[in-house]
Image (cartoon, grey):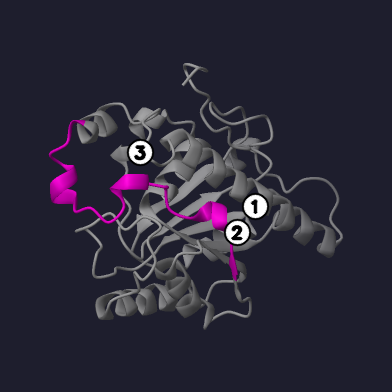
Amino acid sequence: MLLLLVRHAVTAATGNRLSGWLPGHHLSEEGVRQAEAVAARLAGLPVKAIYSSPLERCRETAEIIAKHHRPGVVTVDDLGEIRYGDWQGRSFKTLYRTKAWVELTQRPADFRFPGGETIREAQTRGVGAIEALRPKHKADMVIVASHADMIRLIVAAYLGLSLDLYQRMSIAPASVTALLLGDRIPHLIKLADSGSLEDLRMRLAKTPTNAARRKAAEGAQGGDGRSPEAYGGGPQPGADGRGRARAATPRNSKR
C-alpha cells in the first residue's frame, strides 16, 4: 500500500489555538485554497480509497480532494486528532507558559494531556487504523486526511523512531507525506511535501505486488531481476518481519 497522509488545510484557529476535537473548526478561505491546491496535485494519481479523520477540517479537505477521484470519503474515528482533554481551545501562547508544556516537549512519550490521552495511546490507535486498511489495499494508493501530530506519530511508528523524537518532524498544512507499506520494510518516500507528486505513480508501479502482477500478465516466469535491496528488503527496527509497525510499548507498565 502506498499511503498518502495529507494534513488538513488551515482554519482560523490553526497555529493560534489547540483545536483538538472541538466542533466547528471549518476551513478558512485560505484553507479552501490550500485544499484545492493539494487536490490538484493529487488529481492525476490512481487513488483507490480516501479516508479521513471525522473532524470538520479534515473531512472538508478530503472532500475537496475526492472531487478529482471516484472513491468517496470514508471517516475513521481512530485517525482523529490527539485527545488533548482540558487543553482543547486554549491558546498556544497560554500553554507555552505551563510546566506541563515543558514536560511535553522534553519527554513526550508517556505524557498524558490533562483529562485526555497519552501520546502513546494516540499512536497506538492511529497505527491500528492504518494496519486495518492494509489487507484491503495491499497494492493500492490510499489517501488519509488527518492531523499534524497523528501523521507524525504514524510516521514515527513505521520508521521505528522513539516517541521522544517524534516532534522533530514538521508537518505543514495541506502537505503530503508518503509511506510505502509492503511485505518488506516501510519506506518513507515524502515528508510534508508540497511539490510535484507525479513520481508516486512510478513508485506504486514498482512495488513487489504490482511488479509481480505485471510479470504474470506478460506471461513471465520468476522474479523481475531486481535485487531485494531495490525494494528495501531486510529487517527494520520498530517493525515486525512483515513490515508492520509496532507502536512503542510503555517503559513503565504501571503508568
Q: Which residues are magenta?
A: 74-99
Q: Residue furthest bottom?
A: 67
Count neighbours of disc 1 (C-alpha within 10 A) and say few if under 14, some if 14 to 19, many if 20 or more. Answer: many
Is mark 1 in CB contact (under 8 Å) with mark 2?
A: yes
> Residue at position x 55%, y 52% from top?
78
Q: Is residue 255 above or below residue 230?
A: above
107 relative to 128, above or below? above
Residue 151 left/right relative to 99: right
Residue underneath mark 3: 113
First in residue order: circle 2 vs circle 3? 3
Q: CA distance from mark 2 to mark 3?
A: 38 Å
- Of the two numbered discs 1 and 3 on the same chain, state the one appearing first in sequence: 3
User: Mark 3 and mark 2 in contact (Cβ < 8 Å)?
Assistant: no
Residue 204 numbered mark, or none: 2
Q: Position of residue 44 (x, y in %)?
A: 52, 77
Q: Residue at x 86, y 50 (%)?
A: 221
Residue 145 in the image: x percent, y percent? 48, 63
Q: Which residue is mark 1?
A: 207
Image quadrant holding the N terminus, namely bottom right
Near-viewer residue (192 or 217): 192
Front: mark 2 or 3: 3
Q: Amino acid at mark 2?
A: Leu
**Amino acid under disc 1:** Thr
58 left or right, relative to 113: right
Total labels drawn: 3
Q: Is residue 78 magenta?
A: yes
Looking at the rendered structure, the kind of residue marked 3 is Phe
The answer to whether marks 1 and 3 mark residues whose Cβ atoms lie closer than 8 Å is: no
